[in-house]
Image (tube, rainbow, N blue to C red):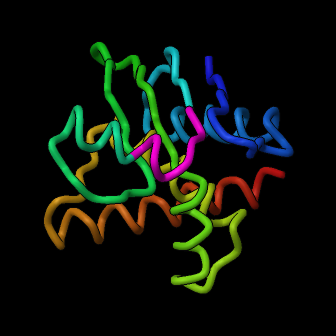
Amino acid sequence: MINFNYETEFSLDNEEAIALWLSRVIASESKKEGEINYIFCDDEYLHKINVEYLNHDTLTDVISFDYSVGNEINGDCFISVERVKDNALDFNVTFDEEIKRVLAHGILHYCGYKDKTESDEAIMRQKEDDKIALFHVEQ
């Protein structure tokens, strides 16, 4: 089950369509859907998590905590709406595309993809693009 939670004024306009798409993303990686919680927040909220749990004193757009067991993916994915808005401007994409990128990014981490090295990051970006395309094809 995919759940959306809001710790800021933001909310998704199309939760049902997004949840269905994320379910397809999970299935496309031959994984079983467990419980995935998305928590939308602001920079301050996510920064506190980054410092407290990861010892990183930086701003970030997404932090995912993976609780997967075997082939069933489970996790909590925190997303800073402020960072997503800024990144959309920086990367010259729409907010809608960038929010889909971070939503897929969390799922991809749960599926075992990493992004710490340049080669891993390139694979992650390609996977994100592939998963975003699933939304456009299926809608």
Label tally: 0
Query: Whole-percent x and y of residue 78?
Result: 47, 38
Quadrant of the rendered image containing residue 67: top left
Query: Whole-percent x and y of residue 27?
Result: 54, 33
Would residue 42 be counted in the magenta stretch? yes
Query: Whole-percent x and y of residue 30?
Result: 44, 32
Please tell me which residue lies in front, 131 or 1.
Answer: 1
Residue depicted at x 33% and y 19% = 68
| 61 sits to left or right of 52 | right
Please tell me which residue lies in front, 56 or 72.
Answer: 56
Residue depicted at x 67% and y 40% = 8
Quadrant of the rendered image containing residue 4: top right
| 57 sits to left or right of 131 | left
Q: For the magenta stretch, what is the residue range?
A: 39-46
Query: Whole-percent x and y of residue 93?
Result: 64, 79
Quadrant of the rendered image containing residue 18: top right
Residue depicted at x 41% and y 24% = 75
| 24 sits to left or right of 44 | right
Would residue 28 be counted in the magenta stretch? no
- Look at the picture and state if 43 lies above or below 1: below
- Quadrant where the image shows the N terminus: top right
Residue depicted at x 81% and y 32% = 16
| 4 sits to left or right of 69 | right
